[in-house]
Amino acid sequence: MDDWRVVYESRNRRGCSDRALVLASAQIVYEIIDDGLSCALVVPAADSARAVAELRLYDDENPPVQPKRRKRVVYQDALPGLIAYVLIVCAVTGMAGYSFFGGDWLAAGRVDGTLIRSGEWWRTITALTLHADIQHLLGNLVFGVFFGIFAGRLLGSGVAWLTILVAAALGNTANTLLLESTHRSIGASTAVFATLGLLAGYVWRGQLMAQDRWSTRLGPIIGGLALLMFTGTGDENTDIGAHLMGFVCGFAAGMVLTLVGRMPAPPRTQRIAGGLALALVVVAWFVALRV
């Protein structure tokens, strides 16, 4: 082998094999030397210049694939939104149980298909804060806080919970329009699944995960649907339609947020969004108890 020259060396055996095909197509005699740790292509000294030129041309035409960089995520403080969620849901449940202000909170605030279709829009919001019993309340608190942590960390408390509230209200509206007019329901579960959909839509549309393979690209959607099927279906008292519509509306809202501007929004915008979310709940209940 004294008259032979090394024209390529690498620990990547696939790279050696590919370049060996290049030399073969150029009718250049070669040998592959593999010592178990790396491999090398050697050619006769007389052909080394031509071999190097062929390999350089191959490299120019086939640059190495650079993996897409993950988008940098600046995580936010989710605690304010979580505290507000827990306090509002618990406060409304308590006041409804004791009939504060002399009103029937359940009758005034629940989803009622006939009344919503006649224009009582506030029910799509007030129903999110009502619960049938302590088990119903605790279930929605646990799942709401769990998914709310991720949403708040990703989008900021204000924007996240305003989006969740709007998406959940739209989910209740859509569910009411699709079902019989006599449909009635209460509970924050629509908001819980709107949160899940929001996360899936935002992460998928915002390409916050590695984009190498189709399975990874669809990961947020598949994961969201799996959780929807696992936690969103149950006994005959489970409002599957509200869960599904909440997820769909949340998913759409998540995709929209990737288009409206820089996320997460600055602190001032977060405060405004959080204030709007609180105001929507207060106004909805004010109207509900006055009618």
Image (tube, grey):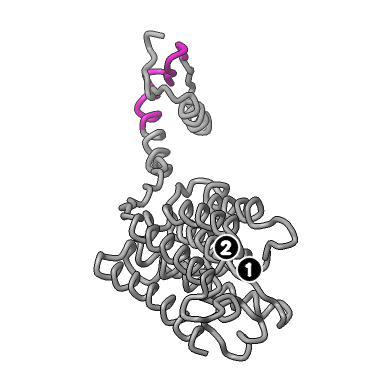
Residue carrying label 2: 189
Question: For the residues marked 2 and 1, what is the alpha-carbon distance in whole angstroms?
Answer: 8 Å
Q: Position of residue 110 (x, y in %)?
A: 59, 76
For the residue pair 127 and 213, the one nearer the viewer reads as: 127
Question: Residue, x 47% and y 67% (percent of image)?
Answer: 164
Residue carrying label 1: 242
Q: Are marks 2 and 1 in contact (CB under 8 Å)?
A: yes
First along the sequence among labels 2 and 1: 2
Q: Position of residue 216 (x, y in %)?
A: 53, 47
For the record, the magenta segment spans: 34-52
| Amino acid under disc 2 | Ser
Task: Report helix, strand or loop for mark 1.
Answer: helix
Q: Residues within 10 Å of mark 1 (few under 14, many from 20)?
A: many
Looking at the rendered image, the disc whose residue lies closer to the viewer, 2 or 1, is: 2
Question: Residue, x 59% and y 55% (percent of image)?
Answer: 135
Does the magenta-highlighted stretch encompass residue 43? yes
Q: Where is residue 132 in the image (x, y as percent from the top left)?
A: 61, 65
Q: How crowded is mark 2: few (under 14 residues within 10 Å), some or many (20 or more)?
A: many
Query: Quadrant of the rendered structure where residue 42 is?
Result: top left
| Amino acid under disc 1 | Ala
Direction from residue 274 to residue 109 in the image, left or right: right
Direction from residue 205 to residue 190 in the image, left or right: right
* Residue 43 in view, yes or no: no
Question: Residue, x 32% and y 61% (percent of image)?
Answer: 264
Does the magenta-highlighted stretch encompass residue 47? yes
In the rendered image, the quadrant that contains the N terminus is: top left
